[in-house]
Image (cartoon, coloured by chain):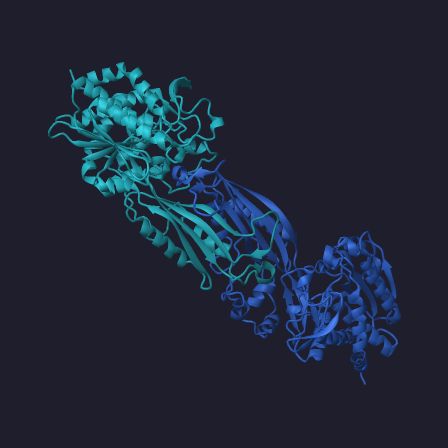
Chain colours: A cyan, B blue
């Protein structure tokens, strides 16, 4: 008899109890961005502390200048790893309230598309997700009287409002929080059947470039053909950024970009998401990025240059024969792997400067920059977790990536020298941040079982 | 004794009288665009008719559905040419009135930059200009008892309000108005010393192009690198319109463009307007058009493609990681010589279509189109007029061109099969259409003398 089977059985038996606890947590209106809910946020933290104590965690509410953190520790066997699990108990605001089918803070079990779902604000993001881990610990403890690793829980109360207290808290409590690695449960599955580990998060460099030509707007009849036109200069600069194969031509841009391992690419291909299928949903069909790469590779493992806005000259109704004095564009670069945001920004600026007519100039405005997060596809942790997920779901778990970012992962790397395992059970249609948020009951149930299996895999004696 | 000398002497002697008459005309508030001045417009027409009758013209006020025309005929010697002279008696509105240094309709002689000027609305545009010709006729008639050509005068009262009645009037009175050629006095000198004949007016094709990509705005994190970006597509299209030498690459675009005769280009070079000088006034220095051509050739004899406006994506403050569903640009082409506006428009649209990714489309909006007017540089009429102007001003008259257009010239060509001689004595700083309009006293005086010399040159027995 394996040590995991009884834990899984207990999770199954306790599903109703775990749902009752999740509902209690959802009922607490912990909207972090709205000062009116400050007390509710604290109540959620206190609820978690109380609940964790029932499992045997040494749990406490830890004050910050904003909403409090919850930190809880539980010992493990000698020689077992130290694992830190991160989640957040705060939620997004609920307006517009009239678009909700029910009170956002009155959780319930409903049915959508033939599947049972848990409804309510925070059901998926992130209360439902974080409780999958707590319930896995509860079942394990109940069954074995101990946990298989030293486990630290860190639950934040400001994730939906910019995490102002997070970095100072990590820095002030680094010794306490530093573990062998972190587990973050704020991501999703590939689809409702296919579990996933997120190993890549693209970084971002934002730039606004303005081309300045004449010192005033000119009449195109009087000056056309003689005076530099900043829209023309800008168009030439932007058009030169991609070559005919969709590759970015800025010198040094690809420094730090790595080739994705063949087996990872094959796994992505196996997901069957064609460009026609992915782009077809928005009325497109042809990938705009580098030729010869799948749409998932383009989205997950290749850097981009995108033009997010452009403006210049007369933009109103009708026509005006003007040559503008300036024109500008908002340009962003999605970064992957080890690309350096500062170098990419500098290379872009040099690229623009090199293409200016001698009587024009460019000015730049910086709009943020963050490096990509690339976790190993095949570290022992990832490999064990993938096996555990595959066993639970009966379908091979895939290493996926995300367009957006999860700042905590970078903070763990930078401040605590700690890599993260990103596993979550959300689905694309969970409507997080929107009215009628839901979490699949299957995600909540099998999520608990998944974490139990992952804990087992990570701590099995070799 | 030449027949012209006494005419010139009489013009000199009658300068005060001619000024008194011009002042009478300026005092009439013939603002054509404002219905409140309808009666004033008619008064101006009636004043002209009465004045022309004193010279011996068969003059009449001719009603239209708008403001009336003035048409006047005077016989000439058998075998002499029939010349039509065009001007307009209506003027621009005068607001903002508080920017005028004096009542716009109280003409006066003032001094500006050490030179005597006639001030008042219409002093230059076009009452002062048209009276130069009338006074030349008056002096000739007084001296010789006849005029040297059959002369028809056509004075319009709606030039400043779109000339709605002009075409119908020309069509309805074609037989009466058709002359050997027309003389139009609504243009300017090269500078205050250098007389000019305008032989080219660039045409214009306006287009608005919109590139459509996804059927909604997309998040650049989720779709960047996969979804077509319409700003990128638009930038590539616009950037491809000019090659590295500033030449326009649209197939067929240069059809109908002619090389400017070497002697004309040399004459332009002789004007000494360098790119540094022309562009320096607006903070630029390098001509943006075709390499190897002077700035005046670029402005006067070469076609252009200009981007007058561009718009797409997020244009507000800050940054938004959006991939827009569409982006658009306003594009105009200045045409020269025999370029066909319809063909240029079609060629541009085909050029865009040929550069679209397969999953994007373009839509177009037409914003006007008119062909260029190119008059001969060296017809006998132009040559004679140039000689006459050169003699009067003591400086070689130049054939110049204009960025703007004078629709009447095209109408005369199309409706009456009649070429125009464009001679005028305005200066760039006359502030036509603006407060404190003025006309140089020298322009008014030597303008009369110029027309007398031109009449003499055009009718001299060979």
Image position of A29 (left or right of B111): left
Query: Residue B19 location in percent, x, y?
Result: 78, 74
Horizontally, residue B369 falls left or right of residue B48, namely left
Position of residue B216 relative to residue B150, above or below, is: above
Quadrant placement of the C terminus of chain A: top left
Instruction: Kindly give the residue lying farthest to the top in the view shown.
Output: A13
Residue nearest the viewer, comparing B351 with A17? A17
Residue A265 location in percent, x, y? 30, 35
Residue at 72% in and 79% down: B392
Q: In this view, does B214 lie above or below A254?
A: above
Q: Which residue is drawn at 43% across and 57% down?
A: A363
Q: Which residue is at the front of the view, B349 or A390?
A: A390
Q: Nearer the viewer, residue B147 or A9?
A: A9
Position of residue A196 measured from the top left corner of the image (x, y, whole percent): 30, 29
> Outermost residue toward the left?
A78
Please state the total of marks drawn on the protein image.
0
Q: In this view, does B63 lie to the left or right of B203?
A: right
Q: In the rendering, at what x and y percent does residue A289 appear? A: 39, 42
Residue visible at 56% across and 46% down in the picture: B209
Based on the displayed image, in which of its 4 quarters is residue B18 positioned? bottom right
């Amino acid at each position: 008899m394996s040590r995991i089977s009884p834990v899984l059985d207990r999770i199954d038996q306790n599903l109703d109890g775990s749902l009752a606890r999740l509902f209690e947590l959802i009922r607490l209106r912990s909207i972090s961005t709205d000062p009116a809910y400050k007390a509710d946020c604290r109540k959620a933290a206190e609820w978690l502390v109380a609940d964790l104590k029932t499992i045997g965690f040494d749990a406490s509410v830890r004050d910050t200048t904003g909403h409090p953190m919850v930190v809880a520790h539980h010992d493990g066997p000698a020689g077992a790893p130290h694992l830190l699990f991160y989640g957040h108990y705060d939620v997004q605001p609920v307006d517009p309230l009239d678009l909700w089918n029910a009170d956002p803070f009155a959780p319930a079990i409903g049915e959508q598309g033939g599947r049972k779902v848990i409804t309510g604000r925070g059901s998926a993001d992130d209360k439902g997700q974080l409780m999958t881990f707590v319930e896995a610990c509860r079942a394990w403890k109940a069954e074995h009287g101990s946990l298989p690793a030293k486990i630290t829980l860190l639950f934040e109360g400001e994730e939906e409002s910019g995490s102002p207290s997070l970095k100072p808290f990590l820095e002030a409590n680094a010794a306490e929080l530093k573990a062998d690695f972190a587990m973050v449960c704020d991501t999703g599955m590939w689809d409702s059947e296919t579990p996933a580990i997120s190993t890549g998060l693209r970084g971002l460099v934002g730039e606004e470039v303005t081309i300045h030509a004449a010192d005033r707007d000119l009449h195109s009849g009087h000056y056309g053909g003689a005076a530099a036109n900043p829209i023309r200069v800008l168009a030439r600069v932007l058009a030169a950024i991609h070559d005919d194969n969709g590759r970015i031509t800025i010198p040094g841009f690809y420094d730090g970009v790595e080739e994705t391992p063949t087996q990872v690419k094959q796994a992505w291909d196996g997901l069957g998401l064609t460009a026609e299928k992915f782009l077809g949903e928005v009325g497109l069909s042809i990938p705009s990025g580098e030729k010869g790469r799948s749409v998932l590779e383009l989205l997950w493992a290749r850097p981009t240059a995108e033009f997010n806005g452009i403006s210049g000259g007369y933009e109103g109704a009708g026509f005006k024969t003007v040559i503008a004095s300036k024109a500008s564009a908002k340009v962003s670069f999605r970064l992957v792997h080890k690309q350096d945001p500062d170098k990419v920004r500098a290379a872009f600026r040099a690229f623009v400067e090199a293409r200016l007519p001698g009587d024009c100039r460019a000015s730049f405005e910086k709009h943020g920059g963050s490096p990509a997060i690339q976790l190993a596809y095949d570290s022992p942790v990832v490999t064990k977790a993938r096996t555990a997920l595959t066993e639970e779901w009966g379908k091979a778990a895939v290493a996926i990536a995300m367009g957006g970012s999860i700042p905590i992962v970078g903070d763990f790397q930078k401040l605590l020298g700690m890599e993260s395992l990103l596993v979550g059970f959300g689905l694309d249609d969970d409507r997080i941040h929107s009215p009628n948020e839901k979490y699949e009951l299957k995600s909540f149930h099998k999520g608990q079982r998944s974490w139990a299996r992952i804990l087992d895999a990570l701590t099995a004696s070799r």
